[in-house]
Image (cartoon, rainbow, N blue to C red):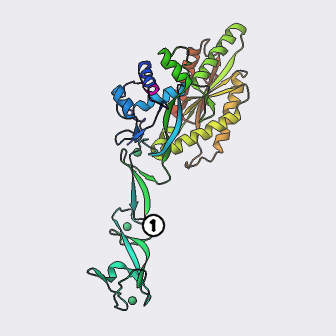
Amino acid sequence: MSSNQPSGDKHVAIDTEENRLKILTAIAGLAPQRRLEPEISKTARLGYHFPSLSELLGCNPGDEIEILESLADLGCLSRQLFQQIDLCPFCLDSDLRLRRLCPSCRSTLIAKKEILHHFRCGWVGLREEAADGTELICPKCHKYMRHIGVDYERAAQSYYCNVCKKIFNHPLEQFLSLTCGRDIPKDGTMIYPIFAYQLTPVGKDVVNRQSFEGIPVQKGIIETEYNLYTRSYVERRLGELVNRYLRYQVGFSIALITVDGFSKWLDEKGHVVASNAIKLLASVLRGETRGVDLPGLYDDHTFIVLLPQTGHKGANVFARRYTERIRQLTTPGLEEPPTVSIAIGGCPDDGEDSDSIMARLTERLERCKLKGNLIIGPDDE
Ligand SMILES: [Zn+2]
Ligand SMILES: [Zn+2]
Ligand SMILES: [Zn+2]
């Protein structure tokens, strides 16, 4: 029941260069548009798959989407929005079943009841009170009600709960996640896009040459959903700052910031609330950094900030200011203001190469996380 990564367990790496090439070549052969649309699948996690491709690769239905996404990131395919689906915000599975429940006792044992109106005498009541075999007899004036629209009308529809016996107009509608068993409010699902994919000129070139050579492999610079730099970009820039230090003896600072409550939020509130909270904290982080600073996303709930012109005193001030700002934050879906653990470090205090600096910083962050809501820098050791 705890939060799992999507389709986590026995995952075989299928996103290989060989498979990417196979898929691109297959799509290039699709006349005339070189475009592939998904089809409904009962077994795929997202409820959609590309059967020709999963057959081609011999993978589970839907697993081929990972490769299509990589190819789209590389610019070999373009994405065209095809459908939007609802995912369980906890297990990220699309296997949701809509259920109608009694609003008072939450039982599913409810029945629709019809309410009739007899024009002649004005009687309004349950159809079953008037039913006499196949005929309808008004319980008030005891006349037959024969013709709908002439003698009587359907006034309304109500529901009756067989457990608590209440009558109500609107049942409570919510989803049951068949994968994790949780109840999800109707508007609490995670909306997720399903794409069709089309070959781009870049992809066509790869197919012609049967090689990815010359296509930039690294992902972009900005993690668009968070508006932060990507980890790979920050790491590259970290390498440059280390080189600058080695050449000119100009030091710099780094802050590694982890959001304390993240796994608890995932468990208790689901992915939508948790990732929205991270996005909010990311936007506050961007607001607190200056133009020369580089705020990046380190993992799904950890930020990294390069502070090229800041010593660790200044980095400490930055960390305190950020902590103070988020203490005043109201985060949708969370009762308590979020807290963060921050490890501060830098060059040359923590080493003179990226790996040692990051190792010291990560170790420091682990100690922060034990207590939570804490800032530790090199001076605190
Ligand atoms: Zn009547
Ligand atoms: Zn009930
Ligand atoms: Zn679920």
Query: Vertical placement of 97 versus 31: above or below?
Result: below
Looking at this view, is 22 or 256 the one in front? 22
Q: Does the magenta stretch include residue 9?
A: no
Tell me which residue sits at (33%, 86%) in the image.
137
Q: Which residue lies furthest to the front in this view?
A: 32
The image quarter in which residue 78 lies:
top right
Tell me which residue sits at (57%, 47%) in the image.
336
x and y percentages locating residue 93 in the rendered image: 41, 42
x and y percentages locating residue 354 in the rendered image: 59, 15
Tell me which residue sits at (42%, 84%) in the image.
150
Task: Report the image quarter containing ligand 1.
Answer: bottom left
Instruction: Please give left or right for residue 298 compared with residue 110 in the image.
Output: right
Q: Quadrant of the N terminus?
A: top left
The part of the chain drawn in magenta is 26-32
Q: Residues within 10 Å of mark 1 (few under 14, many from 20)?
A: few
Tell me which residue sits at (60%, 46%) in the image.
331
Instruction: Please give left or right for residue 251 compared with residue 138 in the image.
Output: right
Identify which amino acid the numbered label 1 is placed on.
His
Looking at this view, is 357 or 122 the one in front? 122
Residue that numbered label 1 is attached to: 170
Query: Vertical placement of 369 versus 209: above or below?
Result: below
Query: Vertical placement of 106 versus 91: above or below?
Result: below
Considering the numbered disc 1 on the image, is that residue within a helix, a strand or a loop?
loop
Q: Is residue 291 visible?
A: yes
Looking at this view, is 140 or 275 the one in front? 140
Q: Residue furthest left?
A: 133
Please count the marks in the image: 1
The image quarter in which residue 66 lies:
top left
x and y percentages locating residue 194 in the rendered image: 48, 39
x and y percentages locating residue 236 in the rendered image: 61, 18
Q: Quadrant of the C terminus?
A: top right
